[in-house]
Image (cartoon, coloured by chain):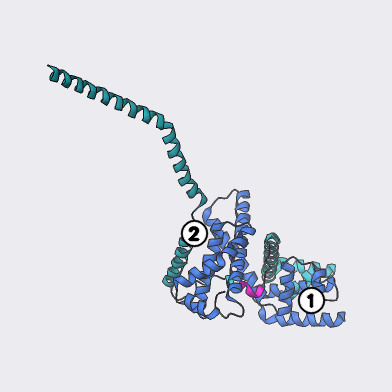
Chain colours: A blue, B cyan
Amino acid sequence: MISRNDILSRLKARDRSAIELVYKCLFPSIYGWVSLNSGTREDAEDVFHDSLLSLIIKLDMDKVQLTCDFSTYFISICRNKWFQILYKRKRQTQISCENCRAFSYDMHEMAEEEEIANNRYCAFIEALHDLDSRSQAVMEASLNGKSNEEIAMEMGFINSQAVADKKKNCKKKLIRILAGDKANIHKVNGILKLHRAYCK
Amino acid sequence: MEYLNYIEHIVNDNISDEEKDLFIYQLINNTALRRGYEKYVSIENLIKDEEEAIVSILHELTDYTLEISKTPDVDDLSDDHPSAAQIHEASELIRSVIASNRPAKPGEKKGWFMAAAVLSMLLIILNPCIMETLKSSTETSNFSTAAVMGRESDIITN
């Protein structure tokens, strides 16, 4: 068990023994999970490195507020990191396939397209953050592969059609956010409330 | 974005044919509406593509659920950091810890075993030859010693 405050202050001070402690305690489970999800040892090492580095950077900027055990927190960062790496790889494959189809092998163009794909992902995630908590929960469940029926059961919607309507409204909000029209989101929320009242 | 409400109405609501025709007519003649519509369609496609990509990755992952509230943890914060040198230093430190704790690759161990095995095999194969050489050299030296001894005994006799 790693003590929460102690380890954070030691990591912030770039204490080598603290990094070694984190590595020895948590790397085996990170490696186990990454290899379970089609990764190699090198991948797991990259995930560990990137996650710890981003944690140290956040510590430098005093942006870390732990609400759970350090191990749980760090492993969750690593898992998100591996998800992001897999996402990037998938996009890279898609881009290279598209380029192959178009008989274009310009590496510079490919790098640019990769950056655009990355920016699109970041924009999408940021837009999801700007949604209200209920819309966020519906989108989260939908992205995690849950059906409308399951979401209706779990979140107390009347039926699956209500979930479908909610998703449609979430997408409207996302479009408004991405179009830079955040000020009008309340209009969509208002329409949604009216719709709910009408359904009742 | 201009005409967003109008575009949203056309795209999402049930509209009459007249309304549709009017929208198409305006799309041809109104540049701002056309641009707005193109932007709307591209954003719609972006959302669709990102959703599809995320869902397919999550489908392949075991023991993982995406939590939107936790996704900022994976953001690349290096741009916000005041000192790039400090980041580099921390990165090097983490890399060195990983390298020092990395177990020897199975291939490397096998290499040593292989070398040891080859050496012992060589010794076994070469052993009779070495023994032979040693034996013959011993015999030669014995013979020459005996010869020398013989001459000496002759001298002594004479």
Whole-percent x and y of residue B71? 62, 72
Q: Position of residue A175 (x, y in %)?
A: 69, 72
Q: Is residue A6 above or below residue A95?
A: below
What type of secondary structure mainly makes up the magenta span? Answer: helix
Give B42 or B72, whichever is nearer the viewer: B72
CA gap between label 1 and label 2 equals 46 Å
Q: Is residue B22 left or right of residue B87?
A: right
User: Mark 2 highlights which residue?
Assistant: B102
The one of A138 and B40 positioned closer to us in this rendering:
A138
Secondary structure at numbered mark 2: loop
Is residue B82 shown in magenta? no
Q: SS of the residue at dot 1?
A: helix
Which stretch did the figure color magenta?
Answer: B68-72
Q: Where the C terminus of chain B falls, by quadrant? A: top left
Q: Residue at x 55, y 75 (%)?
A: A2
> Is label 1 in contact with label 2 (beta carbons under 8 Å)?
no
Left or right relative to A55: residue B59: right
| Picture layout, residue A50 above or below residue B152 | below
Location of the N terminus of chain B by quadrant is: bottom right
Q: The residue under label 2 is which amino acid type?
A: Arg
In the rendering, at what x and y percent does residue B150 appear? 20, 20
In the image: residue A181, left or right of residue B93: right
Q: Position of residue B3 (x, y in %)?
A: 71, 75
**Residue designated by label 1:** A155
**Front residue of this view, candidates A6 and A111:** A6
